């Protein structure tokens, strides 16, 4: 990895970890973050209008909104 790719990947990982930690502490139901721009830290372009589904601090699904199934009962 080049330094800039490594930096982006590290920043993305830190942001996801922090978000997961915040949501996990009082999370009984999955949470869906919708309408986000998803940057995965690789050479692929950002994914606009993405959905990320998180439950108990784990990312269950992430990608274009039209390709992600949101479980029943998700906040």
Image (cartoon, helix red, strand yellow):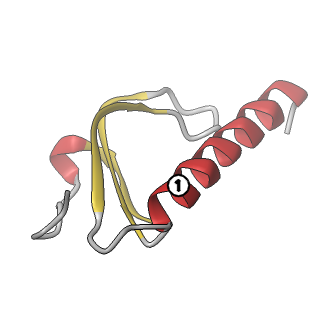
For the residue labelled by badge 1, is the local secondary structure a helix, a strand or a loop?
Answer: helix
Looking at the image, is 44 positioned above or below residue 66? Answer: above
Instruction: Please identify the quadrant where the N terminus is shown.
Output: top right
Q: Residue furthest left?
A: 72
Q: Is residue 21 above or below residue 2?
A: below
Spot the residue most to the right.
Answer: 3
Residue 37 as seen in the image, left or right of residue 19 = left
Which residue appears at 64% of the width and 38% of the height?
Answer: 42
**Location of residue 63 in the rendering, given as x and y in whole percent from the top left corner:** 34, 47
Packing grade of label 1 (10 A; few <14, some 14-19, many >=20) is few
Q: Residue at x 17, y 61 (%)?
A: 69
Residue at 48 percent across and 66 percent down: it is 24
| Nearest the eye: 62 or 18 | 18
Of 41 and 36, which appears nearest the observer?
Answer: 36
Residue displayed at 16% across by 69% down: 71
Q: Quadrant of residue 15?
A: top right
Residue carrying label 1: 22
In this view, the residue in front, 11 or 1, is 11
Image coordinates for residue 75, horizontal then vertical, percent? 20, 57
* Residue 12 found in image quarter: top right
The percent coordinates of residue 31 (x first, y second) are: 29, 58
Residue 20 location, x and y as percent? 53, 57
Count how many numbered circles sit on residues in the image. Answer: 1
Does 63 sit left or right of 34 as displayed? right
Residue 1 is left or right of residue 37, and the answer is right
């Amino acid at each position: 990895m080049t330094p800039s790719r490594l930096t982006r990947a590290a920043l993305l990982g830190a942001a996801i970890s922090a978000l997961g930690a915040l949501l996990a502490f009082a999370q009984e139901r999955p949470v869906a973050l919708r309408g986000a721009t998803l940057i995965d830290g690789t050479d692929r372009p950002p994914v606009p209008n993405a959905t990320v589904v998180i439950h108990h601090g784990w990312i269950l699904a992430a990608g274009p909104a039209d390709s992600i199934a949101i479980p029943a009962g998700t906040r």
